[in-house]
Image (tube, helix red, strand yellow):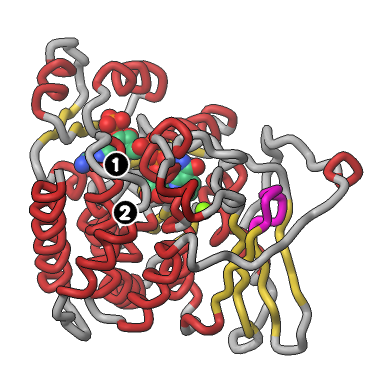
């Protein structure tokens, strides 16, 4: 029987690639619901092609534009809890969460609590609310399948590895467009330069996160929750070719890696068809053409965001929530050209320093820390500009 899926963030980079995976395997999937932010026009095309039962838009005006199109039999949801409703809908087997930012937290929890499997691209959910999400996964006995390429790689490497044999995780990072820039050059970085990622084509926020290396920091925290390892057993290695998507080191010293061309449709498809492997449109990798693979240590001096993420994870409780929220606000301000590139880590550090953490937080503590940190950062940026 076809897997009945809901895609949250269907109009984004991951969302549209997920629909491409679905398009190529029509007998395997039935798209029951789609959720987007404000892109009513692309959502309308997706409705035409995939015929979901329900859709949602975060933006009321966009929902109004969609309603005027008169799409008979389609339920259109809007308002603050629309995505949660979509995620918990009856007759759904799996929810792919591909929205960006902490907006993904409550829909993920709603899906898990309704007993759905979750394919998670939205790493911010685990960074901000990892303890609560993992507890819900255990309580409701659902699958949480990683979509992020590094975590999918680790998940693939761990198939057939017994519990307890995993010694260390090695996350690879391209290093972003400023891998070789000096500290002074980083002060002068423009938005256009930061948006030009060398190896991956992605949404705006994650592209900036990749340039600051915060993306890798968020991924360290994501890996901590998914694979239950402490920070000192999660290592980051710069690997500019983005061919090795990550590695695991086992108890006996063996390293196992997953390699391939950089194409997100592979990890998306694996999450949707796990444990099966099906043919995919992803190009096969030529090792001969690739020639060489390089590795170097990340520079935490030039890229303080990665250091801040390790520190927040080690501090625990609501510190990663604050890291994530402050980063979202700072990145948004950078994209609006209100602050400079190197202001991003400075502002996040300041948010972490003023935060009085809550240990063993529940979801209310997390949402509160998230909101307070956003407010703090907005006022800092207002003063700065
Ligand atoms: P995009 O910005 O391309 O897409 C984001 C999607 O979320 C869009 O569909 C957008 O809708 C929707 N959205 C944004 N805010 C809201 C909201 N408040 N309510 C409902 N929908 C909303 O992001 P990406 O696809 O690049 O990234 C999505 C997630 O996947 C992120 O967490 C990212 O870190 C992660 N990821 C992405 C990778 C990639 O290759 N892109 C790789 C690994 C992880 P609309 O367009 O209508 O505004
Ligand atoms: Mg990644």
Going from N to C along the chain, the mark reached first, 2 or 1, is: 1
The part of the chain drawn in magenta is: 239-245
Q: Nearer the viewer, residue 382 or 119?
A: 382
Q: Nearer the viewer, residue 67 or 327?
A: 327
List x then y, in percent, for residue 368.
9, 67
Q: Which residue is mark 2?
A: 344
Q: Secondary structure at mark 2?
A: helix
The quadrant where residue 371 appears: bottom left
List x then y, in percent, for residue 9.
33, 38
Q: Residue at x 57, y 42 (%)?
A: 264
Q: Is residue 232 above or below residue 90?
A: below
The numbered disc on residue 334 is: 1
On whether residue 242 falls in the magenta region, the answer is yes
Q: Residue at x 34, y 71 (%)?
A: 137
Quadrant where the C terminus is found in the figure? top left
Q: Are marks 2 and 1 in contact (CB under 8 Å)?
A: yes
């Amino acid at each position: 029987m076809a897997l009945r899926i809901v895609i949250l963030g269907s109009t984004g980079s991951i969302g549209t690639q997920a629909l491409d995976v679905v398009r190529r395997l029509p007998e395997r999937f039935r798209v029951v619901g789609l959720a987007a932010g404000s892109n009513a026009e692309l959502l309308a095309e997706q409705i035409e092609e995939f015929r979901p039962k329900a859709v949602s838009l975060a933006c009321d005006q966009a929902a109004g534009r969609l309603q005027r199109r008169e799409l008979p039999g389609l339920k259109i949801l809007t308002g603050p809890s629309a995505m949660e409703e979509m995620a918990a809908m009856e007759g759904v087997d799996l929810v792919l969460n591909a929205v960006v930012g902490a907006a993904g937290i409550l829909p993920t929890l709603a899906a898990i609590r309704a007993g759905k499997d979750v394919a998670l691209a939205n790493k911010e959910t685990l960074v901000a609310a990892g303890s609560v999400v993992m507890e819900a996964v255990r309580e409701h006995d659902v699958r949480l399948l990683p979509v992020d390429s590094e975590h999918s790689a680790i998940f693939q490497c761990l198939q057939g590895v017994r519990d307890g044999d995993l010694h260390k995780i090695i996350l690879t990072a391209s290093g972003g467009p400023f891998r070789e820039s000096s500290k002074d050059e980083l002060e002068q970085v423009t938005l256009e330069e930061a948006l030009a990622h060398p190896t991956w084509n992605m949404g705006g926020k994650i592209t900036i996160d990749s340039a600051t290396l915060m993306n890798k920091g968020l991924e360290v925290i994501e890996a901590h929750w998914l694979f239950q390892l402490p920070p000192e057993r999660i290592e980051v290695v710069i690997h500019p070719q983005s061919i090795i998507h990550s590695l695991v080191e086992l108890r006996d010293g063996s390293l196992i890696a997953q390699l391939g061309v950089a194409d997100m449709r592979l990890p998306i498809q694996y999450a949707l068809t796990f444990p099966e492997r099906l043919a995919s449109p992803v190009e096969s990798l030529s090792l001969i053409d690739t020639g060489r693979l390089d590795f170097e240590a990340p520079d935490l001096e030039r890229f303080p965001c990665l250091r801040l993420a390790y520190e927040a994870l080690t501090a625990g409780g609501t510190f990663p929530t604050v890291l994530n929220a402050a980063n979202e606000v700072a990145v948004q301000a950078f994209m609006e050209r209100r602050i400079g590139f190197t202001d991003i880590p400075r502002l996040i550090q300041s948010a972490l320093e003023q935060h009085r953490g809550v240990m063993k937080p529940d979801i209310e503590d997390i949402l509160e820390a998230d909101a307070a940190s956003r407010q703090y950062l907005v006022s800092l940026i207002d003063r700065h500009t």
